[in-house]
Amino acid sequence: MATTETISDINIRPLQLEDVDVIAAIENSAYFAPWPRAAFTASIGIYPAFVMEKNAQIIGYAIFSAVKDEAHILNLVIKPILQGQGFGKLLLKFVLEILVQNHVKRISLEVAQNNEAAMRLYQSLGFLQEGMRKEYYQTPHGRIDALILVYKPSYTSAH
Ligand SMILES: CC(C)(COP(=O)(O)OP(=O)(O)OC[C@H]1O[C@@H](n2cnc3c(N)ncnc32)[C@H](O)[C@@H]1OP(=O)(O)O)[C@@H](O)C(=O)NCCC(=O)NCCS
């Protein structure tokens, strides 16, 4: 599934082992309960993963699993100071396009029910709610539910 895309000063390329320190720092700045550094190291070579660079600096990443015609988005992050500028949507569209090209028919993910930015992003690209996982995420105020969202290329488009 490895590929790259370059748009102006933005480049998307496969995640490499030497990116892990930068990725882990972004992860720690983006989440209350971040993935540990070891989770990124362990995921390389197992899960398809991409970093987004702006002017050759990593500003975000996406990690997903894909088995036969199903995929699950495991992590999608844009560096906090650059959120809200369209980079998350660009990265997610890139991932969806790769999965669609590889004939994936169902792409799922979990999102915290109070994560307005992520909900807006996923809904704007055609994800629909398919279920809920009770008390799935830890927050500073206790555990909250996750919504299960699903994207099916057959009923929508990534554009
Ligand atoms: C979720 C995330 C990846 C989105 O990336 P982003 O670059 O900030 O989002 P974009 O600028 O591409 O915006 C995508 C959509 O969300 C909307 N949006 C962005 N920030 C928002 C906010 N704070 N509140 C509400 N909507 C927001 C945008 O208006 C846009 O919607 P539109 O296309 O209908 O106009 C990013 O905010 C992030 O890394 N968050 C922390 C990690 C996380 O929660 N990841 C998702 C796990 S499920």
Image: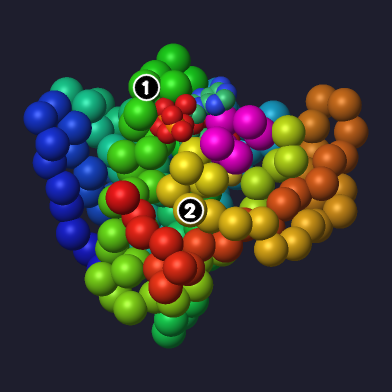
The percent coordinates of residue 99 (x first, y second) are 34, 67
The percent coordinates of residue 85 (x first, y second) are 37, 22
Tally the marks.
2
- 131 w.r.t. 124: above or below: below
Disc 1 C-beta below 8 A from ligand 1:
yes
Front residue of this view, candidates 116 and 46: 116
Q: Amino acid at mark 1?
A: Gln
Magenta-tinted stretch: 115-120
Give yes or no for residue 153 being in the magenta stretch: no
- Is residue 57 left or right of 151 when viewed as pictured? left
- Is residue 58 left or right of 109 when viewed as pictured? left
Q: Amino acid at mark 2?
A: Gly
Q: Give SS at disc 1.
A: loop
- Is residue 36 left or right of 83 when viewed as pictured? right
What residue does disc 1 label?
85
Q: Earlier in the sequence, mark 2 or mark 1?
A: 1
Quadrant in which the N terminus is drawn: bottom left
Q: Give SS at disc 2.
A: loop
Identified at 48% across, 21% down, the residue is 80
Would you say residue 13 is visible in this rendering?
yes
The percent coordinates of residue 39 (x first, y second) are 55, 52
The circle drawn on residue 114 is none
What residue does disc 2 label?
126
- 88 w.r.t. 54: above or below: below
